[in-house]
Image (tube, rainbow, N blue to C red):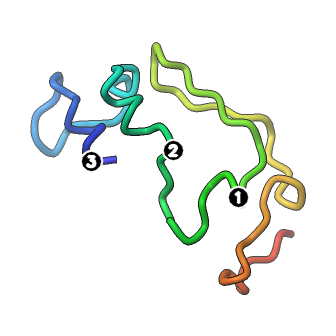
Amino acid sequence: MTPVKNFDSNNGCGQRTVGSESASEEAKSILKGFDFNIKAILSSIFFNPINLNTETGEVSMLALVPSNDFEASASYFFYAPL
């Protein structure tokens, strides 16, 4: 996320955010296919549609149902939906 945060030209060092900067074409190209964990790619464990408002940078999704929306990787033996 640091490369996207660095597009924030409205705030100084330590105050920068990802927010609306995600609307720029450069930021979108960085975010396309982004995953926090290469061993558990988001699309392989999370099945709730994610919507990005490119005007505001707001991310929204339907109400979560953990037993339907998540499938833990085999390496995450400690995860158990309630």
Q: Position of residue 1 (x, y in %)?
A: 34, 47
Asked which secondary structure carries label 2, the reply is loop
Q: Is label 3 in contact with label 1 (beta carbons under 8 Å)?
A: no
18 to the left or right of 65: left
Residue 27 is situated, as x and y percent measured from the top left of the image, at 34, 30
Q: Earlier in the sequence, mark 3 or mark 2?
A: 3
Which residue is the extreme one toward the left? Answer: 13
Amino acid at circle 2: Gly
Q: Characterize the local packing of mark 1: few (<14), some (14-19) or many (20 or more) Cα atoms within 10 angstroms.
A: few
Q: Given the image, on which type of amino acid does mark 3 rest?
A: Thr
Which residue is located at x 30 percent, y 27 percent? 26
Q: How far is mark 3 from mark 1, CA to CA?
A: 24 Å
Q: Which residue is mark 1?
A: 44
| Residue depicted at 70% across the width and 58% down the height | 44
Comparing marks 3 and 2, which lies closer to the viewer? 2
Residue 33 is labelled as 2
For image coordinates 56% across by 71% down, the residue present is: 39
Q: Which mark is residue 31?
A: none
Above or below for 39 versus 44? below
